[in-house]
Amino acid sequence: MTPARVLPLVGGCNFRDCGGYETTDGARVLWGRLYRSGLMARLSAAATAQVQALGVRAVCDLRRTTERALHPNPCFGPEVHRFEWESEQESSPIRDRAFANSNDEAGVHAAMLTMYERLPFGLQPRLAGVFAALDHAAPGAAIVHCTAGKDRTGVAVALVLESLGVRREAIVEDYTLTNTAVDLRSQLLGQDGMGAGLAATAEPILALSAIAQEAMLAARPEYILASLGAIEARHGSVRRYLLDELALEPAMLERLRQRLLT
């Protein structure tokens, strides 16, 4: 019986198992080793216990310092190592007021693509940390998350899956699953319309134009492909990016393949 990919945790947001994906050489990613998620601050006590029961040994929190302070993670136990970075607001075209007020669908779409092209090069310490978290977690599980579990987490998980040799179409499938796995508008905005860190502090997402909101909350294939395309344009391959841009050791990448594939 195939395990559930989307875990219905009370208070969870976009919590998913990244197992089961096939690689180009016929192997498969092990279930129960790599999880991805959005905001976890609202997990119920029972859901927190469910996460603890997954054998988690590392939580890689890609959020900014202010996001973590506003919505701290629950404690998953003393054996769980927390990977966090002191970082403030990332430079991004979607933080511009022109994006917030735009009713130009093509312009908004272009801004999202530009953001995704920049993410692999603006988040190097955190992205390298994801691989360190997975290395640390063996033989247990690791969780990679941000606020929505879509943009920063999407790029990070795509890089891990690429490093394992997962087929590109499966990587896109995993990324776009956000569209059906979670209602981000409801999860992140809530009934009172208060944001949960997805939008810039001074520009709540409800103040964005309808077109900008839609673009920001969607997980479109071309977004993640823009990240991977930018990597390949600059480095020739994702592997060279991992070795050169993130300064990962080939031995680590091989260890992860041995531990995460079957």
Image: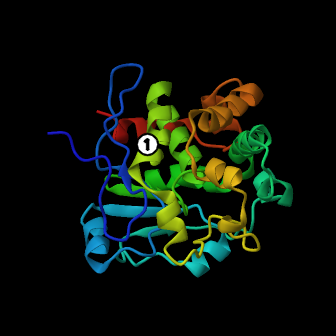
Q: Residue at x 66, y 44 (%)?
A: 246
Residue 42 drawn at (x, y percent):
42, 75
Classify residue 7 as left or right of residue 37.
Answer: left
Where is mark 1, residue-wise?
Answer: 177
Residue 97 drawn at (x, y percent):
84, 60
Query: Observer-nearest residue: 162 or 203?
Result: 203
Rendering quarter of residue 54: bottom left
Q: Residue at x 78, y 49 (%)?
A: 103
User: Which color scheme did the rendering employ for the protein?
Assistant: rainbow
Q: Residue at x 77, y 39 (%)?
A: 110
Total numbered badges shown on the rendered structure: 1
Query: Observer-nearest residue: 44 or 195?
Result: 195
Q: The residue under label 1 is which amino acid type?
A: Leu
The N terminus sits in image quarter: top left
Rendering quarter of residue 67: bottom right
Residue 117 drawn at (x, y percent):
73, 39
Residue 196 drawn at (x, y percent):
57, 72
Which residue is at the far left? 1
Q: Please determine whether, in this image, residue 189 is positioned above or below residue 246.
A: below
Q: Residue at x 34, y 62 (%)?
A: 56
Label 1 environment density (alpha carbons within 10 Å; few <14, some 14–19, many ≥20)? some
Give the secondary structure at mark 1.
loop
The C terminus sits in image quarter: top left
Query: Observer-nearest residue: 189 or 4?
Result: 189
Q: Please determine whether, in this image, residue 47 is positioned above or below residue 127.
A: below
Classify residue 187 as left or right of residue 99.
Answer: left
Residue 24 in sight from this viewpoint: yes
Residue 252 in sight from this viewpoint: no
